[in-house]
Image (spheres, rainbow, N blue to C red):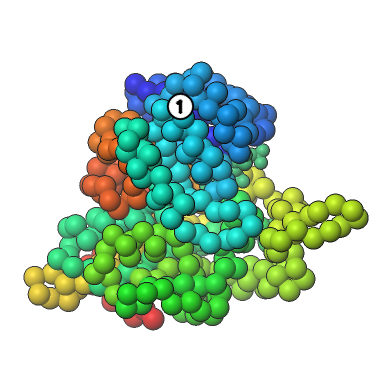
Amino acid sequence: MSKVVIIGAGGVGGVVTHKCAQLPEVFSDILLASRTESKCRAIAAQLARPIRTARVDADNVPELTALLRREQPALVINVALPYQDLTIMDACLAAGVNYLDTANYEPRDTAKFEYHWQWAYQERFQQAGLMALLGSGFDPGATNMFTAYIAKHYFDEIHTLDIIDVNGGDHGYPFATNFNPEINIREVTADCRHWQDGQFVTTPAMSTRQQFTCPEGVGEFSIYRMYHEELESLTKHYPSLKRAQFWMSFSDNYLKHLEVLGNVGMTGIAPVEFQGQQIIPIEFLKQLLPDPASLGPRTQGRTCIGCVVSGIKDGRQKTVYLYNICDHQACYQEVQSQAISYTTGVPAMIGAKMMLEGTWQQPGVWNMEQLDPDPFMADMNRYGLPWSLIEEPGFDLL
Ligand code: NDP
């Protein structure tokens, strides 16, 4: 029986709140706090069980610390934006509260996707006897767990990792992003980095592509190599990896819009002066695009996200593919959200459950793969993200 404070009432915040509310035996008291309280109340109104809401500016450490001291929760689930990670970690330390997030810290003025800012909190969390769990979404999150599970049960040593994230869904808009547009566009326009023989190799964004056929009839998609933050922690924690790559599917239509927006400067993150005001183009673009939380009713199709791992077992070379398939409309029926927010929010709830039940409770700052994957993987099956595993899938990946 534990009290949690969930920060952020966007697409992911809605799903986490629904999923936590479904488990009163673990999450006995839920406070949903965000910058705009009306969004918290709208989510609360969808639930079968009462929760409390509050307004908080998570950029403001004293304000958030005061809220946490008043509430004394066991855990903060941070599903605001990556910009708030450090201020929320600071407030958690000040108020003596455990911490969980789904995306690594990013400064607003550079899109870097690096863990070092958060890893630097290791000693402070350890000394305070508190735990911070980093990246408990799907990717990062479930993908780290998939890798850890495969490494634990199927290999003596893993050598290559390909994380493949396919969204076979269609929302019917000419252009929209499935999660926060600003964060999404910063991610996909960044230089690609992949791990090769002990170092990261940089190539231009979207310059490497291949075709991938998903199992269970989800379809064939163009997937593009890009950088994703779990590559940093997974290559650190699995030093036997000789190559690690992340691939994501994009439609030609999405890429064309992105190219044009980039060419005219609309995806820029540096301020420009407009009629006497400083405007950040990508923030303005976010205002114009559909709110990802509103895509639920109109998105059809399935996602298919998984990990292909190869390596050595008992002296023999082998390959294993572990994946989840998730249906956008089934998610909407359950929690009024599309599958991208769902696949992020469910692992956030499960990570929180692991911490609150004591299964994973250990002071310090941890990436998911540093913890035992077995109870997490069992809960993925139990709480809406069942997975399948294929040995020797026969893929011919670049
Ligand atoms: P949204 O933009 O839909 O929601 C973000 C929410 O955070 C909004 O409600 C926003 O408030 C609130 N917020 C922003 N700034 C503050 C602040 N200073 N104080 C309090 N609340 C604030 O984003 P998503 O729900 O799509 O994404 C949430 C997080 O999940 C992001 O960090 C994203 O990177 C991560 N993510 C992780 C994935 C994974 O698989 N690991 C996949 C997808 C997303 P307001 O409404 O007032 O703007």
Relative to 212, is 301 above or below? above
> Quadrant of the rendered structure where residue 76 is?
top left
- Relative to residue 271, is residue 145 drawn left or right? left
Residue located 16% across and 72% down the image: 312
Query: Ligand 1 is in which quadrant of the figure?
Result: top right
Residue located 24% across and 42% down the image: 375
> Quadrant of the rendered structure where residue 35 is?
top right
Relative to 37, is 265 above or below? below
In which quadrant will I find the C terminus? bottom left
In the image, residue 384 lies at what x, y percent? 38, 43
View extreme (right): residue: 275
Q: Nearer the viewer, residue 102 or 21?
A: 102
Other residues around mark 1 within 10 Å, as few (<14) / some (14–19) / many (≥20):
some
Residue located 60% across and 68% down the image: 189
In the image, residue 172 lies at what x, y percent? 66, 58
The local secondary structure at tag 1 comes to helix
In the image, residue 70 lies at what x, y percent? 51, 18
User: Is residue 314 visible to the viewer in this orientation of the structure?
Assistant: yes
User: Is residue 333 visible to the viewer in this orientation of the structure?
Assistant: no
Q: Is mark 1 within 8 Å of ligand 1?
A: no
Q: Amino acid at mark 1?
A: Ala
- Relative to residue 85, is residue 130 drawn left or right? left
In this figure, which residue is indicated by the disc labeled 1?
A: 95
Residue located 77% across and 71% down the image: 264
